[in-house]
Image (spheres, rainbow, N blue to C red):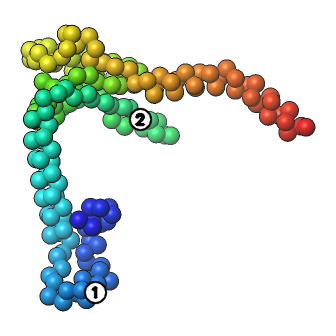
Amino acid sequence: MIIIEHDLPYSFVEHMRFKELILYLYPEAKIPFRCVSTLNVNKLYENDKQKLKQVLCKLLDRINLTANVWTSCPIEGYIALTTHFVDKIIYGFLEYWGIKRKIFSLTLDNASSNNKMQHFLKDIFFCLQIDGLLCCGEYFHIRCVAHILNLIVQEGSKVVGHAIHKIRGEIKYV
């Protein structure tokens, strides 16, 4: 659990000072190797995943989905859900977790790839005759308010940016 809680490497259990501490506290302790630690952490993950899956399957309410697309400084994209294949993967996750009939909405930013992705996902729901979408999916895709506000602020900054630059210059001069 210490490996999980503190995001430590599996090899932590093989550090000399850790071993000394454990053996000082409990001389008969058997210190596991890193491969055993890896197996134990993976087993805990799988057990918790199954527990979560059971909880989600028993939910009577609908579930909202949220996704986002990130771009790093060198213009590398993260989590780009743009192709029909990826949408089937998303549907596969919904099916795997037992929540495909419980989806209420999907909140995304305004990226065109997200528009296509939500259309594909909605089409999959209709093609497979999954009757879980309310109002025939009319309210399935919801635009992310934080993203819209960010776009408004960025556009506003472009308009007033030149004036702010001039004001700063005047303040420096004074």
Q: Position of residue 107 (x, y in %)?
A: 33, 25
Kind of residue sitting beneath label 1? Glu
The residue shown at (13%, 33%) is: 59
Q: Which of the two labelled residues, at mark 1 and mark 2, occupies the earlier sequence position?
A: 1
Dot 1: few (<14), some (14–19), or many (≥20) neighbours within 10 Å? few
Q: Quadrant of the N terminus?
A: bottom left
Tell me if I can see residue 84 in this picture: no
SS class, disc 1: helix
Q: Residue at x 64, y 25 (%)?
A: 157
Task: Judge from the rendering whether residue 126 lies leftward or rightward of residue 166; answer left or right.
Answer: left
Q: Is residue 2 above or below residue 93?
A: below
Q: Quadrant of the C terminus?
A: top right
Note whether residue 64 is visible: yes
Write down the quadrant of residue 120 in the picture. Answer: top left
Q: Is residue 50 above or below residue 84?
A: below
Q: Is residue 160 above or below residue 136?
A: below
Image disc number at residue 70: 2
Q: Residue at x 84, y 36 (%)?
A: 171
Q: Name the residue at 64% across, 23% down.
A: 158
Q: Residue furthest front?
A: 60
Q: Which residue is mark 1?
A: 20
Camera-side residue of 99 and 17: 99
